[in-house]
Image: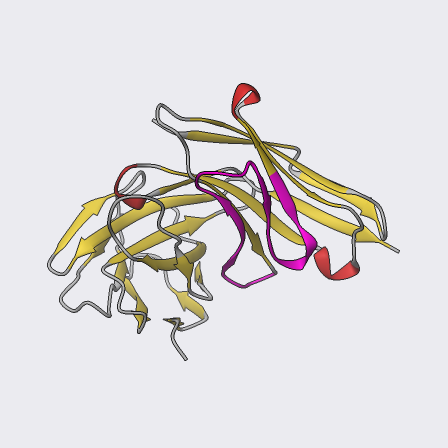
Amino acid sequence: DGGITQSPKYLFRKEGQNVTLSCEQNLNHDAMYWYRQDPGQGLRLIYYSQIVNDFQKGDIAEGYSVSREKKESFPLTVTSAQKNPTAFYLCASSITGEGWNEQFFGPGTRLTVL
Amino acid sequence: AQSVTQLGSHVSVSEGALVLLRCNYSSSVPPYLFWYVQYPNQGLQLLLKYTTGATLVKGINGFEAEFKKSETSFHLTKPSAHMSDAAEYFCAVQGSWGKLQFGAGTQVVVTP
């Protein structure tokens, strides 16, 4: 079955540590996205990538980094510079091109920094 | 730039009653609009979308939404609520490069 996987589902880290969240898709989508979700704020875009080896900052990129070395994978690193990293993180993917593009979402990773 | 406003962060409905979730958008171009549903600790699932054509859009689970350009609205409705409709609902508008701008979400509680 095609889809998006995120691992782990729950992640605990100590303050000051970097942590990497995994996102893999087998939908053959060119575009991938990372969102952060906090209660009452909806989803906010962290980074997005339209093609391998290229990515752009979203609305809240500070304290985060990404890479896109393979079409299937778009890992997100939450660095120690992120002041409030505890949140629910969602990865999504879509086709690219003109017109509307449905984004498909993974199940999410809940990160708690202690 | 696009933006989305969802009126009401929490909505409580009785089982069998009408569900109405409000969404207003702003967009400098003809919009592509989406409604997503999220169950606790899960990802988002697409309920329905408006792209072009018919302004009344039907989606999954008995939901529908009407695009009203004059009111810049895309309200979501379901005639009869079911307990399984308890979830959080997000309205979104597509911007450049396929990026989505989400509203803050509306939590729906269904009471027996």
> How has the structure been colored for display?
secondary structure
| Farthest residue, direction top | B70
Task: Count up the numbered dots.
Answer: 0
| Farthest residue, direction right | B112
Q: Quadrant of the C terminus of chain A?
A: bottom left
What's the residue at 67%, 58% (across, down)?
A: B61
Q: Is residue B112 left or right of residue A11?
A: right
What's the residue at 10%, 59% (across, down)?
A: A53
Residue B94 visible at all: yes
| Farthest residue, direction front | B53
For residue B74, above or below residue B77: above
What's the residue at 44%, 54% (across, down)?
A: A86
- Decide which of A104, A84 is in the foreground and name it: A104
- Decide which of B32, B7 is in the foreground and name it: B32
- How far across and how far down the image is residue B84, in percent? 73, 61
- How far across and how far down the image is residue A17, in percent? 29, 61
- Whether residue B108 appears in magenta in the rendering, the answer is no
Occupied quadrant, residue A57: top left
Query: Which portion, as a residue range, is magenta?
Result: B40-65
Q: Quadrant of the N terminus of chain A?
A: bottom left
| Farthest residue, direction bottom | A1
Q: Is residue A103 left or right of residue A18?
A: right
For residue B72, above or below residue B60: above
What's the residue at 26%, 49% (across, down)?
A: A47
For residue A17, above or below residue B97: below
- Whether residue B53 appears in magenta in the rendering, the answer is yes
Residue A114 visible at all: no
- How far across and how far down the image is residue B79, in percent? 78, 46
